Amino acid sequence: MRPCTRLLAVATDAGSSRPFRPAPMALLPPIPLYRRLLRSHRKRLGVEERMLGDMYIKAEFRAHRDVENPVQIIGFLTEWQLYAQMLEGDSWRGDKMDKAKIDKMSGMFSLDVFCLTVCLWEYRSADWPAVRAHAANQETRPARCI
């Protein structure tokens, strides 16, 4: 029996105006995603990292509770779902933030990321009690720059 060339053919995007796109991932609804994130923190992070991360997740989900713009909702859920997948895969250790994402950030959010970075540097230099005391004074946002 001869092999049929039709069955051996492979689809390519050569010559097409639009290349193949990967299938979009299914987004989790907000509550299951929220639970998945907290569960991932509980399983994969240390006590101090988990405390800071849980505060941040809770504050962000609370701040985006009343958003009605579908584009913002999809972007919010997509980024948090990618974060959960990255955290569960352990590919995040030693990884750096993408420059394009940093450029898209609003001024206040980029300040939060910078302050979080400063807090992490202080944590690594064994000055964690000062950061923890300052974070305890913050109600809804993670620790600010000291």
Image (cartoon, helix red, strand yellow):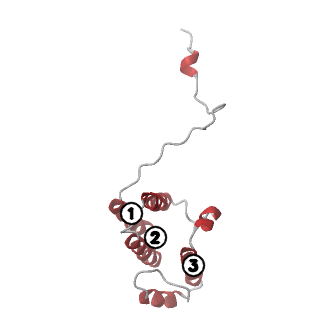
Mark 2 = which residue? 45
The type of residue carrying mark 2 is Leu
Closer-to-camera residue (10/102) = 102
Residue 75 location, x and y as percent? 48, 59
Residue 94 visible somewhere in the drawing:
no
SS label for mark 2:
loop
- Residue 11 visible? The answer is yes
Task: Give the label, 3 or 2, closer to the camera.
Answer: 3
Q: Which residue is mark 1?
A: 68
Give the residue at the far right of this rendering.
15
Q: Measured from the top left, where is residue 50 in percent x and y?
A: 43, 74
Residue reaching furthest to the left: 31
Left or right? Give the position of 97 relative to 32.
Answer: right
Nearest the camera: 101 or 122? Answer: 101
The residue wearing badge 3 is: 111
Q: Where, by quadrant of the figure, is residue 10 drawn?
A: top right
In the image, residue 131 sits, relative to residue 101, either above or below, namely below
Query: Is 44 situated left or right of 122 in this image?
Result: left
Instruction: Say which amino acid is labelled 3.
Output: Leu
**Contact (Cβ within 8 Å) of mark 1 with mark 2:** no
Q: Position of residue 62 (x, y in %)?
A: 37, 73
- Using a 10 Å C-alpha cutoff, classify the residue at mark 3 as few (fewer than 14 neighbours), some (14 to 19) or many (20 or more): some
Q: CA distance from mark 3 to mark 2?
A: 23 Å
Q: Quadrant of the C terminus?
A: bottom right
Residue count near mark 2 (Cα–Cα under 10 Å), binned few <14, some 14–19, many ≥20: few
Amino acid residing under circle 1: Glu
